[in-house]
Amino acid sequence: MQRAFAEVDVFTDRPYYGNPLAVVIDGDGLSDAEMQRFANWTNFSETTFIQRPTDPSADYRVRIFTTTSELPFAGHPTIGSCHTWLASGGVAKRSGTIVQECGVGLVTIRADGDGRLAFAAPSLLRGGPLDEATLAAAVDALGIDRAAVLDSAWIDNGPGWLGVLLASAEQVLAIRPGNTELKIGVIGAHPAGWPAAYEVRAFFPADGVTGEDPVTGSLNASAAQWLIATGRFSPPYLATQGTVLGRAGRVYVSADADGQVWIAGDAVTCVTGTVEL
């Protein structure tokens, strides 16, 4: 069966400078095995399948697959899938607000003042300080001194992230990781006067080596929740990611008066067509 398909670049307004996403626009009727097989074939960090919602308050449902497994939530697939759903003619039930159904439940998405899509950061599934053994493993994988870590915590909102805060973006950019079985987000402040407040990097295990994600919405969301709550970050702010990989990811972080964190980013469509599934 021919199904509408798109490849979009997320957290950038310039094609090929962000994090790519494959999107099957008509994903209804596919089995879990069929979706997983196709996601493995695309070899993108994530491939999504847009489906009719099962919750009457949602506008659409999205299934999010890596090359090996399904994720309950991920940030750049949320913005990229919503961008594609809207571009393919999707109309929200409520003006100005889109409700996405996914593994963690319902995620609210809205367009910010600059036309970017922003999702409401979901609650953490796991928080709190790292035990010393886990922190030691993270420090060893990053190839840094334990004394360089200003703070650390579990910041898992689905993918399994833990967070490590360093003193500077320069330290973050200098990391040359070794092998890890952990999903590690590293954050450090840019010098005063820079357009962006923080540099972010995301490391994960990949076929026996350490992979790095170009731009990571879920990590930026959970890192913001953690570091705003501890008084280290003050929204709104801009975070950069992907610099070491030759990308130019831009993640816009804000918070409502009630403390709800929003993660915004641009998305551009790079490829459209059909796929046989």
Image: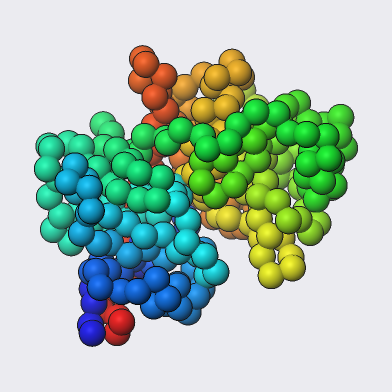
When the figure is inspected, residue 34 is found, relative to residue 233, above or below; the finding is below
Q: Quadrant of the N terminus?
A: bottom left
**Residue 208 occupies quadrant:** bottom right
Residue at 20 percent across and 59 percent down: it is 52
- x then y, percent, for residue 153: 67, 32
Identify which residue is drawn at 81% across, 57% down. Answer: 178
Q: Is residue 57 left or right of residue 252?
A: left
Q: Is residue 171 visible?
A: yes
Q: Position of residue 185 (x, y in %)?
A: 64, 43
Residue 9 visible (yes or no)? no
Q: Position of residue 79 (x, y in %)?
A: 35, 49
Q: Nearer the viewer, residue 180 or 169?
A: 180
- Looking at the picture, how far across and down is residue 245, in whole percent? 62, 57
Instruction: Give the answer, above or below, for where 39 lies relative to 8.
Output: below
Q: Count up the numbered dots.
A: 0
Compared with residue 156, is residue 89 higher up or lower down, i.e. above or below?
below
Q: Which one is nearer the viewer's eye here, 160 or 13?
A: 160
Query: Which colour assignment does the render follow?
Result: rainbow
**Position of the C terminus by quadrant:** bottom left
Which residue shows up at 28% across the image and 62% down it? 50
For the point 57% across and 40% down, the residue is 156
Residue 52, above or below 7: above
